[in-house]
Image (cartoon, rainbow, N blue to C red):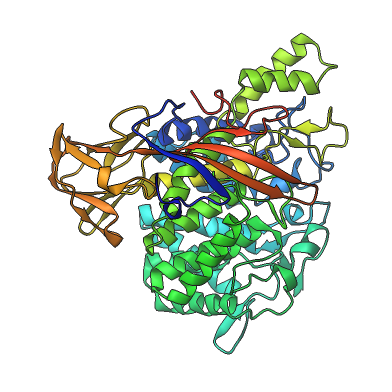
Amino acid sequence: MRDKKKISLRGELCNIQMRASGKIDKPASLNRMAKEAINYLENNPNPELDYECRFSIYPSHIPYHAIAFPPTKYAYDAISLADTDLRMQFVWGPMREMAGIEKASETELGVKRRCSSYIGKDGCCYTNPAAWTGCEVDGIWLSIWGTSNHILYLCDLYEKSKDREVLSTIKNALDTFWGLTVSGAGMADFPYATPYRDGEWLTLGWANAHKDNYAFFLEPLVRYYELTKDEEYKRRAVLMAEAFVNCMIDTRGSQEINPEDGSFDNHVHLHTRCALVGMSHIAYVTGESRYLRWSRRMFDFILSLSPGFGWYAEQMPPKKVSETCVNGDMMWAAYYLALCGELDLYEEMERNWRNYLRCTQFFVTPDVKDFIKLVNPDKSEKELQEAFEELKKLEGGFIAQVTWNDLTQRQHFMKEGKGNKMLYMMGCCPPSGMLALYTIWKAAAMKRDNGIYINMSVTADTPFADLVSDYESEDKLTVRAKENGDYYLRVPEWTVYADVEIYVNGERCDTVWDGPQCRYLLVKGVGIGDVISLRYPLVRLSQKISQTTDEVTQEYTFEWLGNSVLEVSPKAEYIDLFGKQRGIH
């Protein structure tokens, strides 16, 4: 039996056994998932509306695009403005990179033109702020949120192109925003987080609830410093980090992230995107242990209210549903925290691929069709078949909100929806799921100064090695080298290290533990085309855990094999989240 302390799952862990292998549905490779995701990216924007992207998406309803409030002069689906489109712009290149597609499509170029149209002479994003208000609002405002998303896209563009004009645009935007901060005692932060115009911070609708949240600015500062090594921007990033650690802004109330235990209230995604990602990154860049501890405490607080398979609550205190936007942020932060030495987070990243992302990537499967028929009893067979064909345009995207066992959730938003359950795919979440995919892919195999590091047992083609994970095989992980050098393979923490074996081209090698914290097996002198095979026993266990929400406390039992969930009880009311049809293509 494996030591429970090595199994980083909450709840009561029982029936723990070690097995040589196990029968399990294999999730699609990370690259295959990215290729599927491009189908969604291509079909979400509407070319007839200047490539306006769809935010209000309900796959279980006919028609599936049902906007939350009437069209305005600014957009048909105004919540997409400087949000959905900018998020899609950010992940389009990464998805093509993973899928091996070099050329941008006309749709991608159309979305990029749309995103560029928001940008003023100062490099900042100016748009109608309906995405922040959730209701009609007049005028054009400066958007910190939109600008930061665009800056990060431009940073990726500059890293590849080295275009000085792109760098100048980024710098202008960062400098403009810095003028809106308040400072004192070695700290700096924004007084509010909402759009800004003529000395006024927007407080209408949703913006009133979010005005005292964290502004999305730290990560762009750190990213710019990382690219340029300009110490002035590192200084500014440190000032913001100090403001977070020392709770400089005293109006945040319960939305303030507690530096002692990482806890906070309200919307999780605005905390993870605006604070956790940047703090994890600056912890890596500076090596400052206080920033690392702050970030890990916040990360662990979110995990403390999660079951362990990659599901993260939309709100604190939790309601019943996740939000896939949080997955993108958590994987982004985990990437930097793991580089800081928090190696157990590679298990968290692998579980996301095997479970949450696999299960929430949308396809028009038989059980989805059955559910749509159930909640649309007034539709004819012809109407249903036409709806199924139209829904194929959404395949490869990610469902936004799910429960611990069901792909559906209770209906909250639709005024005239059928039934009390629905599938929900708000436009911010699919690109965030893609961001999670890309970050896990980057983390799976890395080139560092002393060799190639294989950090997870996933299936993926990477620039440095092709990886195949197979729990049914004797070889749990197979690595085909693409570069000459020394290879370091991290072994899952829940296995029995004494029983691990490693082979090169079928010949067994000595187990040499090396690398960070001696968690890796070292194979020296690997050549291009060599095949490394990692063998280890799998842990099989039951996890008993309860979820307490604003509605009820529910007991769940998850059955695990390694990092994969086999099944969960109680069973789903409508669509089994871990069903065999989920993500098997």
Q: Where residue 454 sits: x, y (%)?
A: 30, 47
The quarter holding residue 240 reads bottom right
The quarter holding residue 533 reads top left
Closer to us: 519 or 460 = 519
Position of residue 67 in the picture relative to residue 465 (left or right): right
Q: Where residue 192 sits: x, y (%)?
A: 71, 71
Position of residue 35 in the picture relative to residue 551 (left or right): left
Q: Classify 20 as above or below 443.
A: above
Q: Classify 491 as above or below 263.
A: above
Q: Where residue 371 sits: x, y (%)?
A: 72, 22
Position of residue 145 in the picture relative to residue 136 (left or right): left
Q: Classify 582 as above or below 41.
A: above
Q: Residue at x 25, y 58 (%)?
A: 515
Q: Is residue 246 visible?
A: yes
Closer to us: 225 or 297 = 297
Q: Is residue 165 visible?
A: no
* Residue located farthest toward the right when viewing the structure as drawn: 416
Q: Classify 453 as above or below 151.
A: above
Q: Residue at x 60, y 44 (%)?
A: 544
Q: Where residue 327 sits: x, y (%)?
A: 56, 48
